[in-house]
Amino acid sequence: MSREELIAKVNQVLSEEFESPVENMLPDAPMMEVLDLDSLDIVDVVVLVEKHFGFVLKKEDFRTIKSFSDFYDLVENRLG
């Protein structure tokens, strides 16, 4: 999967789950604020990643996530 395909899939999954327009999911945009995520929503993100990408994230993984680009990098690195 190319980076562009990965970004498109991540954005689609997040957009559907959190009812946020894909247009707001810019690489440098603050992910937590754009999606209005709280600690319970992080659990939903973990479940979505496992379901759609086949690996498990830990709550600690989100400490370094500031932007959508950070999240794309995390998913891309875990997919290897």
Image (tube, rainbow, N blue to C red):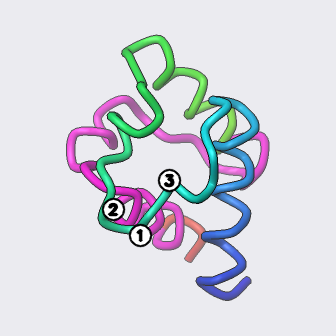
Q: Please report the residue visible at 25 percent of the width from the left and 49 percent of the height from the top.
A: 66
Measured in 3D between alpha carbons, the distance from the residue under mark 1 to the one under mark 2, in whole angstroms, is: 5 Å
Q: Are marks 2 and 3 in contact (CB under 8 Å)?
A: no
Q: Please report the residue visible at 73 percent of the width from the left and 62 percent of the height from the top.
A: 9
Q: Is residue 61 magenta?
A: yes
Q: Are marks 1 and 2 in contact (CB under 8 Å)?
A: yes
Q: Give, as a three-letter code, the residue at label 3.
A: Asn
Residue behind mark 3: 24
Q: Is residue 31 left or right of residue 18?
A: left
Q: Circle 2: is it few (<14), some (14-19), or many (20+) Cα within 10 Å?
A: some
Q: Which residues are magenta?
A: 50-77
Residue behind mark 2: 70
Front disc: 2 or 3: 3
Picture quarter containing residue 33? top left
Earlier in the chain: of badge 2 and badge 3, it is 3
Q: Circle 1: is it few (<14), some (14-19), or many (20+) Cα within 10 Å?
A: some
